[in-house]
Image: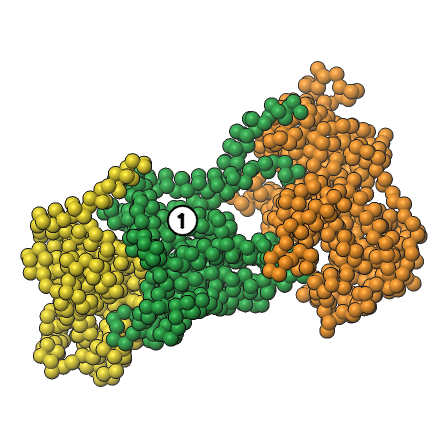
Amino acid sequence: MSEPQQNLQDGADRPGAGVTAPPAIELRDINKSFGPVHANKNVNLSVRPGDIHGTIGENGAGKSTLMSILYGFYEADSGEILIGGKPTSIRSSRDAIAAGIGMVHQHFMLVDNMSVVENIMLGAESGAILASSVAAARAELERLEREYNLDVDPDALAGDLPVGQQQRVEILKALYRGADILILDEPTGVLTPQETDQLFRILDSLRQEGVTVILITHKLREIMAVTDHVSVMRQGEIIADRVTAETNKEELAELMVGRKVLLSLDKAAPRVGETVLRVENLSFVDRAGVARVDKVSFSVHAGEIVGIAGVSGNGQSELLELLSGIRPVTSGQFSMMGEDFSTEHPLDPATMRDVKAAHVPEDRLRTGLVKAFAADESAILGYHRSAAYNSAVFLDRGAIERDCGQKMSDFDVRPQNPALKTANFSGGNQQKIVLAREISRGPRLLLVGQPTRGVDIGAIEFIHRNIIAMRDSGSAVLLVSVELDEIMSLSDRILVMFEGRIVGEVAADQADERLLGLMMANAAPEQAGAAGS
Amino acid sequence: MLRTLTAAAAALLVFPFLATTAVTAAELKPAVVFDMGGKFDKSFNEGVFNGVEKFKKETGVSYREFEVTNETQREQALRRMAQRGADPIIGVGFAQAPALEKVAKEFPNTRFTIIDSVVDLPNVRSVVFKEHEGSFLVGMIAALKSETGKVGFVGGMDIPLIRKFACGYEQGARHVNGSAEVLQNMTGTTPAAWNDPTRGSELAKSQFDRGVDVVYAAAGGTGVGVYQMAKDSGKFAIGVDSNQNHLQPGTMLTSMLKRVDVAAYKAFKDAHDGSWSPGVQVLGLAEEGVGWALDEHNKDLVTDEMRAKVAAASAEIVSGSLTVHDYMSDNSCSY
Amino acid sequence: MSSAPGRIPRWVDVALIPLVNIALAFIVSGVILWTIDVDPFAAVEIILFGAFGYDEAIGYTLYYTTNFVFTGLAVAVAFHAGLFNIGGEGQAYIGGLGVGLGILLVDSSLPFILILPFSILAAAAFGAAWAAIPAYLQAYRGSHIVITTIMFNFIAAALMVYLMVNVLIQPGSMSPESREFAEQAHLPFMHEVFGWFGMQVTPSPLNLSVVWAAICCFLVWAFIWRTRWGYEIRTVGANETAAIYAGIDPRRIVMLAMCVSGALAGFVGINEIMGVHHRLLLNFTAGYGFTGIAVSLMGRNHPVGIVLASLLFGMLYQGGAELAFEEPKVTRELVVTIQGLVILFSGALAFMMKGPIERAYLRIAGGFQRPAGQEG
């Protein structure tokens, strides 16, 4: 089933570009509109069998629409799809599966309380008697795991698996249904660097087994790391096709955004001032009794950016939540602007804002914004009690709207419409709204988590420049990010967290990816002295 | 649509006139407003329904009817009946008394009958029953039949009227057996309690488990569940309002009869015959307004000795030498 | 990306879909009526005429509407905080108890002008207190509010029966009712109000509480969308994590939203006890609290929608009663069935037609827009 196309008959009458087999997928002049929005414009795409083909573009460039057409979620208004050289009509995901296409979505579609093998056979049960089909599915699953080096416990509950393994289950699910073309939609958005590396190894072995992979992403590093070919999309069109080995990040970034993009930042030497945040032996123990933050001590001064590096899930998120008053401290203390907080004198988020600290949370949609609110309402979240937005009883709608309009123009939020629903802005623009809200009041301490997660390249640059501007104006910045590039390019000092502890500190000019990577895995030889500093 | 609405409006305007002509044609236009239990409640409202159906069958005169679904509709329905020229009009149940009083004042030429309550107006006949007397007799039968000395009572919604049933029943049981134990349960506190056979079964079951072997249900449709449970458990049950002996022959010991059917029938029939009179009618044992049912379904269950004792007590009550305490007279069951 | 396919104008969502849902409910009702030999068109006429055809009918319709506005607003306020308040029935019941007790206490000693605000406060306080207990259990003890509010409906019913049968009953009375309030504690009927201005209107139960209901609609709108407390309520309802981040204590918001919700439900007592019955009695809530859930759902938790949905249900209650009155074949159970179908289609199945209608709209609208798009 999963063998590559052997049927060369159709390909014979096509003068291919020196290849013996026809393209695994060929899209010809695909058009798709949603009302006035032209999401895909005359798209032509050709993917060679056994390739890892990257599709890169900013959010809203039309990548996901194109893949949804290929997977049968939408029907193209016009154009043609050829699978293995044969014109194929794909009107539903059932057609796509029949044509050998499998899709791994950004958000997994697993049933948490079912086992891996049950999840895999879900919707593809072979007969009425469950037991016999479970046995057959298990045998097939084990064969696939061996063939593609995809190691997952068939009896584990899907919900208990770590994210990286859940993704493998999704891949296995597609292979189980006989896919020889695999579409992965932003697969690394939820993965740690290690899991990302594992995924890329898996993709590599899939390629060796002849599976064609389409990788949708907006991360340049991933394109460069694994793909053979790359197509760049902008505003619904494919504007360039490149052989990955013959291009570079700078060129791709420029193609994506449509202008020159600075991927590295110039910043002046820090002018370090007084201590703004001092953390002493701070701990947080969760309900299961695990110390998620374990006796952490450090301090952040005015005019510097302190970055916290670490693999996701090593306590950085919890640390940020402790310092912003969202979680109660278990033990230890910290002081902000000279005011002490501890279990006896807990900090709540409103007090944090009163002492002129601000917090850009890690997950803007879950924490930083209210999707259902108009943008101007999201732009006062946390400051909604401020006299600037209130008369005696009522909210001052006019002031709120003007204030948001001002922030939108200052931070180049598009569309510049304070009445538009927050959910209707792109990720980058949502993040700009959060950043504008937290920065524009000139906080003395800024706590930032994952400031550019899911944000377009153009917006990343803008956000980074604003964070540096904050620091240059004398604010203290504590930055948590799992993107090493981000940590290294923004921070003046870098702390590394591992299993809730700070295992080392590196000055930014002495940090490199290899050293930080080792520290993040708690395996660096020279860190012994640095631990607990 | 608009045109038909206008037509309907016109019809409404001339309706009083039509109604008047109808009445002068000596055609009786009787009406009945059932209460929230609904006309098929297997009990009180259904008794009225049976009475007016009997009238309809005998005389061929049909009647208008309405079943109310909330407090406010009582007055609305009574007034709409009166506006439409209905006469006489029966209001079923004590809860309609305030509404009926109001409407009866507005339509002094319409004859109203209220069942289970007293409205003191010249155009209203009020029919009330001495349920405590009937309940006394079935209480005696229950205690005479009981081998354990424990008898049960399952009421519908916990309101004074049902306590009146319970109180009479208790007195009857104690009259036979001074140490008789009377277990009482009310089904609930909302009108749903009149129609909850499942809960009725549960209450009966729990009473049987505590040693009761005869249970009296004054709970509308809820009673059906009580009777079923009695049959399933091999115990005895006593029906209420109408003769329910046929529901579970063999385990239905008897039924306490409250002749609302007769009251409703007479309200229409008297008007039909031109002998309708206002005023209060208190129907007890003496007036045969209450009683107990003996038919082919339970004649083997009630022995001659039992019949004799009950007949004797009945005679005493009628003669006045034995008085049964009425719960409603002082809102307590102390006798 | 997410905004691309979502080009459905608001009127499709807030007007067209509810209307289609109601139409479907009426079509199914019509089929049922037709099977029992009742002309469905005549039935619709009777319902419409019986609900709006003459002043008394309008009075009754608006009287029901008043109750639904109060309970609908109550459900909506709680819903904005993400809470499903099933306890409107009990809160209305206890609110009415508050009105009754308050008036019984002062009706002979205070003038109307003082009794009115006193009763409104009593209704609000009792309703709020009854909602506050489940709210506390939810906020601080984690008991699910759907379960606790349902249970509190039963507790309210039991408490009322106990009080009415044992404590508040008028001695010697057959029915469990309190004494009638003194004249100055009656909320004037609207036909009396019109009478003051020389207008003759047929009496109906419609009373001044309809004005209070209208005021409450405005107050709820202003509270939810124009105050910081409303903002906090909506934040907690839409995204509790974001609320905590913003320094809003969700527990306090649960208390606040439920108390406001309970107070609004309690105003049913103003309409029923002070406005119509003028005495404390049992079962005056008659399911209005439950209907309020459907009203709020249908009205999209917005006062304007709630007024429209309340009118619809007022029409169904009053017009339905007229239908049962006029058509002997139509029993009250059938009227409830029609009401149930409306609730089913516009509540439970509210989104059944959403997809097809939106697709149809896009097809029609897209047909107009495509040529322009291709040129561009």
Question: If the image is split into quadrants, where does the C terminus of chain A sit?
Answer: bottom right
Q: Say which quarter of the image contains residue A186.
A: top right
What residue type is disc 1 on? Leu
Q: Residue placed at 12% from the left, 74% from the top?
A: B307
Task: Indicate the colour of chain A.
Answer: orange
Q: Residue placed at 25% from the left, 65% from the top?
A: B98
**Is residue B193 visible in this depiction of the protein?**
yes
Tell me residue C120's x, y (percent). Answer: 44, 65
Q: Residue placed at 17% from the left, 72% from the top?
A: B130
In the image, taking residue B236 as reference, residue A228 lies left or right, namely right
Tell me residue B76's x, y (percent). Answer: 27, 55
Task: Indicate the colour of chain C.
Answer: green
Q: Residue placed at 46% from the left, 59% from the top?
A: C86
Mark 1 chain: C
In the depicted structure, whether residue A252 falls above or below residue B78: above
Q: Observer-nearest residue: A357 or C199?
A: C199
Tell me residue B127's x, y (percent). Answer: 16, 66
Q: Give the residue at mark 1.
A: C311
In the image, taking residue C46 as reference, residue C17 lies left or right, namely right
Q: Observer-nearest residue: B107 or C40?
A: B107
Task: Indicate the colour of chain B.
Answer: yellow
Question: If the image is split into quadrants, where does the N terminus of chain A sit?
Answer: top right
Q: Observer-nearest residue: C315 or B190?
A: C315
Q: Say which quarter of the image contains residue C161.
A: bottom left
